[in-house]
Image (spheres, helix red, strand yellow):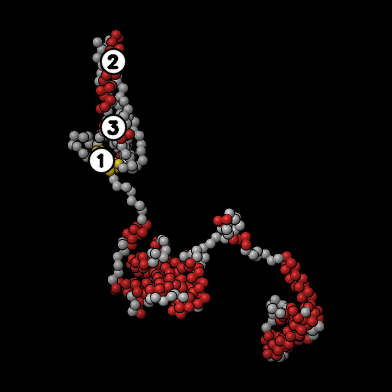
């Protein structure tokens, strides 16, 4: 009777996974190699092979592969049995550590599997704050020394040291205006530009701290950014409008709390701005931006946009023809008027009134041998004669507004 040899498990081929915690279980079944002693015992050997295969099915070792040590790991040192279908790869972290049990071969690795918390969202503000904290604050003496170096010699390293040491001040001031703009990172960027401008303009010999001086520049740049980006269309183009943009709502609330009706006249008097500017700014802030392509009566199913009702910028054909005809008549009469002039008036008319590069009064005075004032009087008299001539030929309405 033939005796079947014990099946030996052959290691399955290694499968590569991503660099982060790749866990693989290779459960390839070992094939039994049978060696029969007699030709008549083949059927018994196959039966023994199947029985032995079933017993070995649950004892196959899973192999854990980590890409970092894939090429260096030894095939016989994998530890831990796992079924790939039962592992949650999103919540499992695999770590290979050297060493382990003293009975393991040298160079073997142990598997450490643990559940980790969900990935935290990347916060650019926190990342920026961590970078800012790497720069230490300056002492008053260090600040003064660096400011003097930049003020006297233009040392860029000293200026950079002053800027980086005061970046925390920019974040603090920008945080005060966080409700005026949805992205505080934009405010920090603008405030940093204001800080650099303050360092550029700072005079260390006036006895003022850099932080006190820079705070005004930082606020100015932040406020200008908020004003320019509050609406798609700018709402504050003058000094009075900028004052109303930042203080109109506050002044209304202050007057209402005092029991005073916030009329435009009262607000204009308290803020020292024109009443018309108060009315216009109140309307602008009360209504949002409107698209010219939006339908005028969308609720009624109309498809006509506001842009369809705007007047065209192209000049009308009849107006263009009238202007061209008038220009031709005017040029003809100017030529006829010039033919009636003689002497100094003719030279003044052609060299002062019709040319694109008129000569100066002094040049004509030197040519005529008179003063420039006399040339100006001749030119004034000539202009009156031309006006009277054109009124006679083309009508008096030509010079009416």
Where is mark 2, residue-wise?
A: 47
| Residue 370 is at least partly visible in this image | yes
**Callout 2 crowding tier (Cα within 10 Å): few <14, some 14–19, many ≥20:** few
Identify which residue is drawn at 52% across, 76% down.
Answer: 276
Label pair 1/2, CB-CB below 8 angstroms? no
Please tell me whether residue 247 is drawn above or below residue 342 in the rendered image.
above
Identify which residue is drawn at 48% across, 67% down.
Answer: 286
Where is mark 1, residue-wise?
A: 112
Identify which residue is drawn at 61% across, 57% down.
Answer: 304
Question: In the picture provided, is 340 more to the left or to the right than 141?
Answer: right
Q: Nearer the viewer, residue 86 or 276?
A: 276
Picture disc at residue 62: 3
Please tell me whether mark 1 sits on a helix, a strand or a loop: strand
Where does the image place residue 319, in percent across and percent down from the top left?
Answer: 72, 68
Please tell me whether residue 97 is drawn above or below residue 123 in the rendered image.
above
Spatial distance from mark 3 to mark 2, Cα to Cα? 27 Å
Please tell me whether mark 3 sits on a helix, a strand or a loop: loop
Where does the image place residue 146, in percent across and percent down from the top left?
Answer: 34, 72
């Amino acid at each position: 009777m033939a005796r079947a040899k014990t099946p030996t498990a052959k290691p399955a081929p290694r499968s590569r996974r991503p660099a982060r915690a790749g866990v693989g279980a290779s459960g390839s079944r070992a094939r039994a190699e049978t060696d029969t002693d007699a030709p008549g015992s083949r059927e018994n050997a196959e039966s023994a092979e199947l029985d032995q295969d079933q017993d070995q099915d649950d004892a196959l070792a899973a192999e854990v592969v980590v890409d970092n040590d894939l090429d260096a790991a030894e095939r016989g040192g994998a530890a831990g049995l796992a079924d790939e279908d039962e592992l949650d790869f999103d919540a499992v972290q695999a770590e290979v550590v050297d060493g382990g049990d003293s009975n393991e071969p040298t160079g073997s690795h142990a598997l450490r599997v643990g559940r980790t918390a969900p990935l935290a969202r990347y916060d650019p503000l926190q990342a920026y704050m961590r970078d800012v904290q790497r720069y230490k604050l300056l002492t008053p003496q260090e600040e003064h020394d660096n400011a003097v170096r930049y003020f006297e010699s233009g040392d860029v390293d000293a200026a950079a040291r002053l800027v980086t040491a005061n970046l925390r001040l920019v974040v603090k001031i920008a945080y005060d205006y966080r409700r005026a703009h949805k992205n505080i990172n934009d405010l920090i960027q603008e405030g940093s530009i204001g800080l650099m401008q303050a360092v550029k303009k700072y005079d260390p010999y006036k006895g003022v701290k850099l932080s006190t001086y820079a705070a005004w520049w930082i606020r100015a740049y932040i406020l200008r950014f908020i004003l320019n980006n509050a609406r798609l269309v700018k709402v504050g183009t003058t000094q009075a409008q900028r004052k109303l943009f930042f203080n109109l709502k506050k002044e209304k609330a202050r007057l209402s709390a005092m029991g005073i009706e916030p009329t435009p006249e009262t607000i204009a008097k308290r803020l020292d701005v024109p009443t018309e500017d108060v009315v216009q700014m109140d309307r602008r802030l009360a209504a949002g931006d409107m698209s010219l392509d939006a339908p005028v009566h969308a609720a009624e199913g109309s498809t006509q946009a506001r842009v369809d009702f705007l007047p065209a910028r192209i000049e009308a054909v009849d107006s263009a023809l009238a202007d061209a005809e008038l220009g031709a008549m005017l040029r003809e009469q100017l030529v006829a008027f010039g033919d009636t002039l003689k002497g100094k008036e003719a030279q003044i008319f052609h060299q002062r009134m019709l040319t694109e590069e008129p000569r100066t009064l002094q040049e004509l005075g030197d040519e005529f041998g008179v003063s420039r004032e006399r040339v100006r009087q001749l030119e004034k008299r000539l202009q009156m004669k031309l006006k009277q001539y054109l009124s006679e030929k083309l009508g008096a309405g030509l010079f009416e507004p």
